[in-house]
Amino acid sequence: MENKDNKIYTRKGDSGTTSLIGGKIVSKASIRVESYGMVDELNSFTGCLYEKAQDELVKTFLFQVMNKLFLIESHLAVDPAESCKRHFTEIVAADAEAIEKEIDRMNETLPELSNFILPAGSETAAAAHVCRTVCRRAERTILRLHETEPVQPEILKYINRLSDYFFVLARWISHSSGNGDVVWIAK
């Protein structure tokens, strides 16, 4: 016997629309849907990085990041006429500050950066670089949304700081593995 409550498909989106939290129907090509879709993609790449990471402090922090990204996706999926507070907890300044503390912790052990570096060093470092670039793309998409509909400033700060975190994490992983930075050679 089929469990109808467990179906993943509804067929409601077959015409290219979806509903925001709050019920408003919008195009799947809308900048709002693109924004939370980009954060979802970033979260998936972060999950891949999490599975590759060896260091327990890094894994713990990446797990927190994945949860925070899911919350950000949820905020972005709310109809702007609705209140996010009604549905979800807020993104707060302490969230970006937690990223800054992690960046500072890792940066203390790294040599000064004096060259451009390539997105390599190890498979895990390269995965962190992928997260960095996807994060920056998500940030650009969210900023385009923000130009038409206000986005909570703390979300913008969090995503901006997160791309910095992934950059420093990639360097930290490369150095921790003994490989160091892979320097770009201009020719």
Image: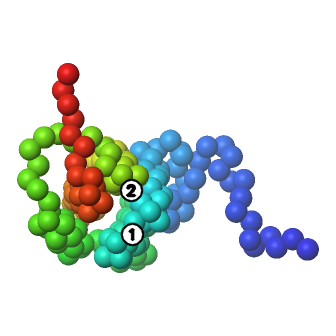
Residue at the outermost top position: 187
Give the residue type at disc 1.
Gln
Identify the residue shown where x is 68% and y is 54%: 12
Residue 29 % position (x, y): 50, 41
Of residues 22 and 180, the one nearer the viewer is 180
Of residues 167 and 82, the one nearer the viewer is 167
Identify the residue shown where x is 18% and y is 26%: 186
> What distance separates the C-alpha of mark 1 from that of mark 2?
9 Å
Identify the residue shown where x is 31% and y is 49%: 121
Residue 93 % position (x, y): 19, 72
Of residues 14 and 62, the one nearer the viewer is 62
Asked if disc 1 and disc 2 are in contact, CB closer than 8 Å, the reply is yes
Location of mark 2 (residue): 124
Residue 73 % position (x, y): 42, 62
Give the residue type at disc 2.
Thr
- Left or right of residue 153: residue 84: right
Callout 1: helix, strand or loop?
A: loop
Circle 1 packing at 10 Å, graded few (<14), some (14-19), many (20+), is few
Quadrant assignment for the N terminus: bottom right
Quadrant in the rendering for residue 95 = bottom left
* The disc label shown at residue 54, or none: 1
- Left or right of residue 53: residue 162: left
Quadrant in the rendering for residue 88 = bottom left
